[in-house]
Amino acid sequence: MESKRQQKYSKLIQKELGEIFQKEAKHMVGNAMVTVVRVLMSPDLSVAKVNLSFLLANNEVLFEKINENKKEIRKHLGLRIGKSVRIVPELAFFMDESASYAQHMDKIISSLDIPEASDEDEEEED
């Protein structure tokens, strides 16, 4: 269970990272949309576990690029929140699979062959 302080930091970092991916890190992500799905803070606030999801991108390649530039992203984060936090947390990025899982389930459900209810079945219920 996260403390109020952890939750406050999580929200702050989620918001700031979202803006960093839209502005300062544009050269890294190109036209891809990077969504900061969730941020979980360690109890001592020194590590932020960041779940990311991507649209319009090769997920693995983009994820690798973001990981390679983790220091630069952390530097931008420091410039934004440095005055309001004691330490700028280390960033640990993870790919959020919930969107691709939802797409996968959508595909499966839409490919199911479910016969329409016939009129006779409906009349029997009366």
Image (tube, rainbow, N blue to C red):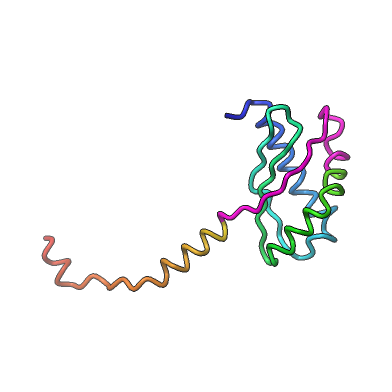
Find out whether residue 8 is within the magenta segment: no
Q: Is residue 83 above or below residue 110?
A: above
In the image, is 69 to the left or to the right of 112?
right
Q: Position of residue 107 (x, y in %)?
A: 47, 68
Q: Position of residue 108 (x, y in %)?
A: 44, 67
Task: Return the residue nearer the eye: 121 or 112.
Answer: 112
Task: Return the residue nearer the eye: 121 or 109.
Answer: 109
Task: Return the residue nearer the eye: 98 or 116.
Answer: 98
Q: Position of residue 75 (x, y in %)?
A: 87, 43
In the image, is 64 to the left or to the right of 104?
right
Residue sitting at 73 percent across and 30 percent down? 45
User: Which corner quadrant holds the N terminus?
Assistant: top right
Residue sitting at 88 percent across and 40 percent down? 79
Q: Position of residue 41 (x, y in %)?
A: 69, 34
Q: Which residues are magenta?
A: 77-98
Task: Return the residue nearer the eye: 95 or 20.
Answer: 95
Residue 43 figure quarter: top right
Q: Is residue 35 above or below residue 11?
A: below
In the image, is 50 to the left or to the right of 76?
left
In the image, is 7 to the left or to the right of 61?
left
Residue sitting at 81 percent across and 29 percent down? 85
User: Which corner quadrant holds the C terminus?
Assistant: bottom left
